[in-house]
Amino acid sequence: MTQEQLNILKGKQVLITGGAGFIGSNLCEVLLDNDIFVVCLDNFSTGKHKNIEPFTKNPNFKLIEGDIRNLEDCKKACENADYVLHQAALGSVPRSINDPITTNDVNVSGFLNMLVASRDSGVKRFIYAASSSTYGDHEALPKVEDTIGKPLSPYAITKYVNELYADIFYTTYKLDTIGLRYFNVFGKRQDPNGAYAAVIPKFVQQFISHESPVINGDGSYSRDFTYIDNVVQMNINALTTDNQKALNTVYNVAYGERTTLVELATLLKKYLSEFDNSISNIEIKHRDNRIGDIPHSLASIEKAKELLNYNPKFDISSGIKEAVTWYWENLK
């Protein structure tokens, strides 16, 4: 992500759905810091007002409180939008298993509403958050974009359907799209609270509170944990590329290395212990594996490097160090 790329967006209007969420608010911040006009659409079901509070006095920021399940809200948000960064979704495999209907309503019907509104408003490019869950039961590592398995959860089904709809909207209506299959994104503003909190902020909060984090299974399951700044870079690259071959396809967004849950917990303890040495003595507990979880996840990022000039700057260690510093300052 270069200044030259960001300059391409000067004078343009970028709509970020789910802009008050974890990833969305980080995207808002980078664009606003570079004097780019941002419209944020959010219904605050999972997004937080505090995530966008610093932006509300910025003349280049507009908040629309609305729901992607409502087509009129989508049309209102897309008015005059040049580009869309569609981050709004109901995440979490367990949530989708507990409530598949709501997950489908938001992630499929809401996604379709946004595609229709973007098409009708003449949006130039629609970038959307896809998911590594799409790989399902395909066991080969690393995960390569063209080869997927059967989905293992309602959430995974919804994210795959998004890819199918995006492809149809290009072939039928010529709306350019790019799907970004996120792999276990983490970083500042990721919510540690609630039943469906992601593992890293949840573990951090537990360590800070001197509680024992609980790992599902024996801790040998592994993930390609991806720091938020890498994800922001990929979104900007997707927005600004002039490579026509890079459009209307999907990409893995990851670092390209995998870390076991035990290794992750050890790394968190290491960096948190620099703030509070007693954290180094906290025990890690285990319980049964979770339904719908895949054992291992590792991305090939060769396609993203080749077509979108993706060059992730943060590996797991440097990303965790950045994230832990932010959490220590904001969770205590």
Image (cartoon, rainbow, N blue to C red):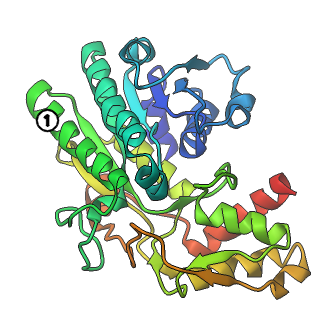
Please determine whether, in this image, residue 63 is positioned above or below residue 108: above
Confirm whether residue 80 shows in the render: no
* Numbered marks: total: 1
Identify the residue at image location x=49%, y=62%: 184
Quarter-wise, where is residue 139 in the image? bottom left
Mark 1: few/some/many CA within 10 Å (<14, 14-19, 20+): some
Residue 265: x percent and y percent?
Answer: 66, 79
| Residue at which label 1 appears | 168
Which residue is found at the position 25% from the left and 20% from the top? 119
Q: Residue furthest left?
A: 172
Left/right of residue 268 with respect to residue 77 in the rendered view: right
Q: Nearer the viewer, residue 81 or 72?
A: 72
> Would you place residue 88 above or below residue 97 in this image?
above
Between 11 and 224, the one lying in front of the other is 224
Q: At which x and y percent is residue 31? A: 56, 34
Q: Position of residue 18 (x, y in %)?
A: 51, 34
The C terminus - image quarter: bottom right
Identified by mark 1, the residue type is Ile
Residue 315 seen anywhere in this rendered image of the structure: yes
Q: Is residue 106 above or below residue 236?
A: above
Toward the front, the furthest residue is 98
Above or below, comparing residue 82 to residue 302 in the picture? above
Q: Is residue 290 left or right of residue 214?
A: left
Displayed quadrant of residue 280: bottom right
Q: Residue at x 90, y 81 (%)?
A: 277
Q: Residue at x 46, y 79 (%)?
A: 222
Task: Label 1, secondary structure: give it.
Answer: helix
Q: Is residue 273 left or right of residue 33?
A: right
Camera-side residue of 55 and 8: 55
Residue 286 x/y as whole percent: 62, 83
